[in-house]
Image (tube, helix red, strand yellow):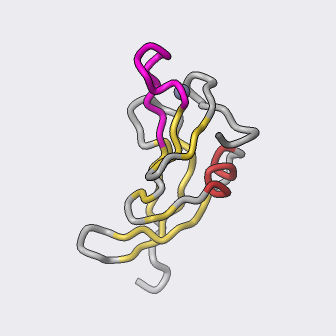
Amino acid sequence: MINGIKCPLCGGEILERKKSFSCSNWKEEDGGCHFTIWKVNFGATFSEDDIIRLFQGETLRKVNVSKAGNEYLADWTLDPTPDGYGAKYTYVPNPEA
Ligand SMILES: [Zn+2]
Protein backbone atom coordinates (compact mmCIF):
# COMPACT_ATOMS: atom_id res chain seq x y z
CA MET A 1 0.00 0.00 0.00
CA ILE A 2 1.20 3.50 -0.75
CA ASN A 3 1.06 5.79 2.27
CA GLY A 4 -0.67 9.13 2.00
CA ILE A 5 -2.93 8.49 -0.97
CA LYS A 6 -6.40 6.98 -1.25
CA CYS A 7 -8.42 5.70 -4.17
CA PRO A 8 -10.15 8.73 -5.78
CA LEU A 9 -13.23 6.64 -6.49
CA CYS A 10 -13.92 4.83 -3.22
CA GLY A 11 -11.32 5.92 -0.65
CA GLY A 12 -9.64 2.52 -0.55
CA GLU A 13 -5.92 1.93 -0.25
CA ILE A 14 -3.73 1.95 -3.35
CA LEU A 15 -1.76 -1.29 -3.60
CA GLU A 16 1.32 -1.97 -5.68
CA ARG A 17 0.92 -5.11 -7.76
CA LYS A 18 3.19 -6.78 -10.25
CA LYS A 19 1.96 -4.78 -13.25
CA SER A 20 -0.12 -2.01 -11.74
CA PHE A 21 -1.06 0.23 -8.85
CA SER A 22 -4.66 -0.50 -8.02
CA CYS A 23 -7.44 -0.12 -5.46
CA SER A 24 -7.62 -2.51 -2.51
CA ASN A 25 -11.41 -2.78 -2.95
CA TRP A 26 -11.23 -4.60 -6.27
CA LYS A 27 -13.14 -7.66 -5.08
CA GLU A 28 -16.87 -7.61 -5.76
CA GLU A 29 -17.69 -8.07 -2.05
CA ASP A 30 -15.57 -5.01 -1.26
CA GLY A 31 -17.27 -2.84 -3.86
CA GLY A 32 -15.63 -4.03 -7.05
CA CYS A 33 -13.62 -0.83 -7.56
CA HIS A 34 -11.54 -1.03 -10.74
CA PHE A 35 -9.29 1.98 -10.23
CA THR A 36 -5.92 0.98 -11.68
CA ILE A 37 -2.85 2.71 -13.05
CA TRP A 38 -0.75 0.35 -15.15
CA LYS A 39 3.01 0.48 -14.56
CA VAL A 40 3.47 0.50 -18.33
CA ASN A 41 0.81 2.66 -19.95
CA PHE A 42 1.07 3.47 -23.67
CA GLY A 43 4.76 2.63 -23.38
CA ALA A 44 5.38 5.10 -20.53
CA THR A 45 6.51 3.63 -17.21
CA PHE A 46 5.18 4.71 -13.80
CA SER A 47 6.99 4.30 -10.48
CA GLU A 48 5.53 4.62 -6.99
CA ASP A 49 6.95 8.14 -6.83
CA ASP A 50 5.19 8.98 -10.09
CA ILE A 51 1.88 7.73 -8.70
CA ILE A 52 2.24 9.91 -5.60
CA ARG A 53 3.02 12.94 -7.76
CA LEU A 54 -0.04 12.28 -9.95
CA PHE A 55 -2.21 12.10 -6.84
CA GLN A 56 -0.78 15.45 -5.72
CA GLY A 57 -2.08 16.95 -8.93
CA GLU A 58 1.19 17.14 -10.80
CA THR A 59 1.52 16.72 -14.53
CA LEU A 60 4.26 14.27 -15.52
CA ARG A 61 5.95 14.55 -18.90
CA LYS A 62 6.88 11.11 -20.18
CA VAL A 63 7.94 9.38 -23.35
CA ASN A 64 5.19 7.17 -24.72
CA VAL A 65 5.87 4.48 -27.28
CA SER A 66 3.37 3.73 -30.00
CA LYS A 67 2.56 0.19 -31.15
CA ALA A 68 4.78 0.84 -34.16
CA GLY A 69 7.67 1.66 -31.80
CA ASN A 70 7.70 5.42 -32.28
CA GLU A 71 8.41 7.56 -29.24
CA TYR A 72 6.47 10.74 -28.51
CA LEU A 73 6.13 13.14 -25.57
CA ALA A 74 3.01 13.08 -23.44
CA ASP A 75 1.80 14.99 -20.38
CA TRP A 76 0.15 12.62 -17.90
CA THR A 77 -2.39 13.53 -15.22
CA LEU A 78 -4.55 11.56 -12.81
CA ASP A 79 -7.83 10.36 -14.34
CA PRO A 80 -10.20 9.48 -11.49
CA THR A 81 -13.02 8.11 -13.63
CA PRO A 82 -14.43 4.57 -13.29
CA ASP A 83 -13.90 3.67 -16.93
CA GLY A 84 -10.48 5.26 -17.43
CA TYR A 85 -6.93 4.01 -17.10
CA GLY A 86 -6.33 5.80 -13.80
CA ALA A 87 -4.15 8.28 -15.63
CA LYS A 88 -4.55 9.98 -18.97
CA TYR A 89 -2.25 11.89 -21.25
CA THR A 90 -2.29 14.71 -23.72
CA TYR A 91 0.02 14.61 -26.69
CA VAL A 92 2.88 17.11 -26.61
CA PRO A 93 3.66 18.40 -30.11
CA ASN A 94 7.28 17.98 -31.11
CA PRO A 95 8.75 21.51 -31.28
CA GLU A 96 11.06 20.40 -34.11
CA ALA A 97 8.28 18.96 -36.23
ZN1 LIG B 1 -11.30 2.26 -5.18
Compared to residue 40, the image places residue 6 above or below, namely: above
Residue 51 is one of the magenta-drawn residues: no
Occupied quadrant, residue 43: bottom left
Q: Residue furthest top?
A: 29
Quadrant of the image containing the N terminus: top right
Q: Residue at x 53, y 33 (%)?
A: 23
State the residue in front, 10 or 75: 10
Please indicate whether residue 28 sits to the left or right of residue 56 in the image: left
Occupied quadrant, residue 42: bottom left
**Which corner quadrant of the figure contains ligand 1?**
top right
Q: Residue furthest front?
A: 18
Q: Residue at x 53, y 56 (%)?
A: 76
**Does the magenta stretch mainly form a helix, a strand or a loop?**
loop
Quadrant of the image containing the C terminus: bottom left
Compared to residue 84, the image places residue 89 above or below, namely: below
Please indicate whether residue 41 sits to the left or right of residue 60 in the image: left
Compared to residue 15, the image places residue 67 above or below, namely: below
Q: Residue furthest right?
A: 4
Residue 35 is one of the magenta-drawn residues: yes
Q: Residue at x 60, y 60 (%)?
A: 60
Measured as percent of width and height from the top left, residue 82 is found at: 44, 29
Measured as percent of width and height from the top left, residue 16 is found at: 56, 46
Measured as percent of width and height from the top left, residue 79 is found at: 51, 40
Please indicate whether residue 68 sits to the left or right of residue 26 in the image: left
Measured as percent of width and height from the top left, residue 15 is found at: 58, 40
Residues in magenta, as a range: 24-36
Q: Residue at x 57, y 22 (%)?
A: 10
